[in-house]
Amino acid sequence: MPSAIFDTHHDGDEVTGPDIQRWAGNLPPDTSDLIGRDGELTEITRLLAGARLVTLTGMRGIGKTCLARAAAAPARRHFAHGAWFVEVCGQTDPELLPHVVLRPLRAQDQSARPAEEALADYLADKRMLIVLDLLDATDELTGACATLVGNLLRAAPYLHVLVTAPAPLGVPGEQVRPVPPLDLPAPGADPRQAAAMRLLLARARAAAGVPDPDEADGGAGGTAGAPDGRWDPDDLAELCRMLGGVPLAIELAAARLAGLSAKVAVDGLGGWIARHEDSPGVITPEGRLRAVIDWTHELCEPAERRLWAELSVFSVCFDAQAAEYVHRGGGARADAPVPLDGLVRAGLVVPERVDADEPRYRVPAAVAAHGRERLRERGEESIVRERHRDFYLRRARDGEVAWAGRAQFEWYRRLVHDLPNLRVALRYCLRRPAEHEQGLLMACSLWYLWLAAGLVREGRHYLERFLKVATAPSATRTRALWVCAAVAATQGDLEQARRHAHTCVSRAEHERDLAAAGYGRHVLGTVALLEHDDQTAINRLTEAIGWHRATGELTPGLLVGLPQLAVVYDRAGERQQARDLLNEAITTCNEAGELWARSIAVHVLGVVDYGAGDLDAAWAHARDALRTKRVFGDVAGIAMCLELLAWVSAKRGDAVRAARLLGAAQENWSLYGLSHAGHVGDMPQHHECERITRRALGEAAFAAAFEEGRGLDLSDAIAYALGEAVPGMPGRRG
C-alpha cells in the first residue's frame, strides 16, 4: 500500500517512526489464504485513501469480512493507534451498540456519562482504523450503526472506518464497494485459472487431506488432485459454475467433496438449484447459496440437523460445553455424542482458537439463518433460547462461586469470551416480563465481570434496566441494589451509589439478609472513602468487614474491604493498622489462590511502604501488583502501579526513569479514556514526584524523558516498568 495515500488525513504527514508501532490493534490473524481478491483489495486501498468511511456491501457468505480484514492488515501501519476489529452481531441490542464498540478498542472510560459521548471523546484525537463488521444485522441495528458512525466521524477527524454490511449506511461521504462473486471458469479456458475454481480445489484438497499436485510434483500437476479419480475436471468445472462464485457456497461444497465424487455432488446439488431458480435457468447468487445450504442440510444426519438448528441461537463464538447443553436439553440421549465434529467437517461450524485451553466455534451467518428457520418451523426457537439463557445464567453463577479461588483467571478469560452470548441472554430476559427476575439474577451475579474486566458502564446499563422492570421485592433485587451501588461508586456517581446502598441496607435488614446488609454498608464506606470523610469511612467499612467475616463473603467483600479500610488508615497516618489489614488480605488471598483482590491489596501496601520511606518494599510491591494487573488487563490499576513506581524512582534519584514512568502513566490514563486528575493527578505524592524530577533534570530533559514515556504503548510501558526488554527501544530496559 503506498504510504503517501493517507497523507491528506494526517495533517499532510505520513505517520512515521516509533508512533507507527504504538498500537498494533486487534485484527484477528489471517488463517486462510484469500484467493481471487487482488482487484478488490487494490480498490479498497484506493477508496480508503480518499474517504474516511468505506462500506463493503453484499450478500451473506460473499466474503466481506475476510476481505475487510485482508485490506485492513497492511493499512494499519499508517494509523498510530492501530486497526481494530469490532464485531456487531445481529442479536445486539441497538441501545448497547456504543458499549459493544468501546470494549474491543480498549477504551476503559468508567464514568457515568453516556457511552457514545465517552467513545467520541476517546477517539477524538486518535489516528485509528476501525473495521466494523455487521454480522447479520437487522435494519434497526444497521440504522443505529449508521448514526453512531456518522457521529464518530464528526467527532474524530483522524478516524477511518471500514464497514461490512448488507447495504450502504447512507452516511455523508461514504464510499461503497459492492463485493461480487468470484470469477467463474470461462468457456474454452482452463477452469483452474478461475478464482472460484482455485478456491474450490484448495478447500477440497484441504478437506480430503490431498496435497496440491503442483507442489507435490514440482509443477507437473495432475488434472484435479484427487487420489482416486473421483474429481473429474469437467464435473468439477460444472460444480464450480453451479456454485456461482459465492465463497461460502464453495467452502460448503468443497467440504462434501472429501467423501463424494464431483459427479455425485453435481447431481445432488442440481435438484436444489432447480428449486431455487426464479425461472428456468435463472437464479441469483443468494439462491445458489441457499440451494447449497439446503443440499448440505439434506446430507446431514438427523442429530446433526438438530444441533445445527440449536446452534443458531449463539452469538459470535461458543464452546463445546455450551453446544452440548443446548443440544442435550432438546431430548438427545445422555449417552449419545454431540455431533459437533460432524458439523465442523461439513464446514457448517468453524473452529476458532481464541483460547489454547478451550477451543471455540462459530456458525457462519447464512448457515445460522437457515438453522433459525428450522427452529421456527419446529416451533422450538423460544425453547432453545431459554436453554441458551439457562446455560449462561448457570455459567455466570458458577463463575461467581469460583471467583475467589485458584481458577479465577480461567473464569475471567472464559466469561470475557462469553460476553457476546451473555449480552444475548440478558437481552432475551429484558424482552420477556416472565424472565425479568432471571435477568436480574444474571446481571448481579456478573458483578466480578463488570468490576474486573472494565465493564462497569455496561454492567450498570443492565442492572438499572432490570431494576426498573423487576420491581417486586426479592432477595435478588436487594442483592442487585448493592451491586449497582458498587458499580455507580466505581464510576464516581456517589449520590446514586449512596441511594442504592441505603435502599439495599433497609431492604436487607427487613429481609434479614446479612450478606446484602454487609455489602450495602460496604458501599456506603466506599462512598465516604472517596469523599474523604475518613471517620465515616472507618465506621462503615469496619462494620461491613464484620458482616463479611460473619457471612464468609470474601470477594468483593472482605478481600476488597480490608484494602479500602487500609487506605483510610494510611491517610490518617495509622500505618501499622493499615499494614495489619493488608497483610491479612494478602494472606487470605494467597491461601485461597485469589489474584484480583490480592493485586489491590499489594498495590495499597506499596503505597503504605512508600509513605513509610521503605522504597525497596514499595518498588517490589508495585511490580508484584503490576504483574497481576497486566494479566487482567486492568488499565486503571496498571496506570496506578506505573505512578507508584515513578514516585519511588524519583526518591531513589533515578529522575529519567521517574519522568518516563510519569509520562507512561499519564498517557495511558488519557489514551484509555480515564481521568488522570480523578485518580492520582491530584495526590500530593504525584506533585512531589514531578517537582523532584523537574528539579533534577531541568525542564528540557524532563520534557524529553516524559515524552519518551508517553511514546510507550501499554505493553511496552509495563515491560519497561518491570525491567523487561522493550523491543526497538535501546536503553529502556529496566
Image (cartoon, rainbow, N blue to C red):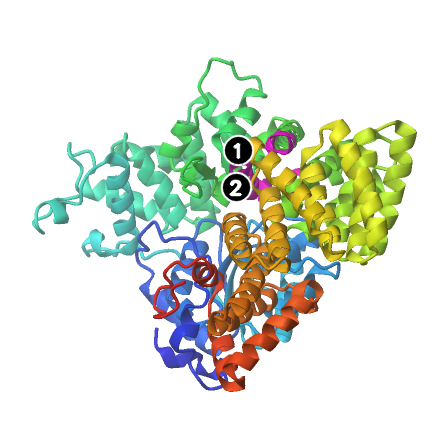
Residue 407 numbered mark, or none: 1
Question: Residue at horizontal 39%, vertical 37%?
Answer: 347
**Alpha carbon separation for disc pair 2 and 1:** 10 Å
- Residue 434 lies left or right of residue 682; in this view the side is right
Q: Position of residue 254 (x, y in %)?
A: 31, 40
- Quickly name the residue at label 2: 413
Which quadrant of the rendered structure holds the C terminus? bottom left
Which callout, 2 or 1, points at the residue further toward the start of the chain? 1
Q: Does the magenta stretch include residue 12?
A: no
The answer to whether 361 is drawn above or below residue 551 in the figure is below
Q: What residue type is labelled 1?
A: Ala
The answer to whether 470 is drawn above or below residue 461 in the figure is above
Q: Does the magenta stretch include residue 422?
A: yes
Q: Using a 10 Å C-alpha cutoff, classify the residue at mark 2 as few (fewer than 14 neighbours), some (14 to 19) or many (20 or more).
A: some
Disc 2 vs disc 1: which is toward the camera? 1
Can the viewer see residue 54 in this picture?
A: no
Q: Position of residue 287 (x, y in %)?
A: 46, 45
Q: Which amino acid does label 2 sit on?
A: Arg
Q: In which quarter of the image is residue 37?
A: bottom left
Q: Write down the region rendered in magenta.
A: 396-425
Nearer to me, 261 or 36 = 36
Q: How many labels does the image show?
A: 2
Can the viewer see residue 697 in this picture?
A: yes
Element assignment for label 2: helix
Element assignment for label 1: loop
Q: Position of residue 4 (x, y in %)?
A: 38, 81
- Residue 495 lies left or right of residue 254; in this view the side is right
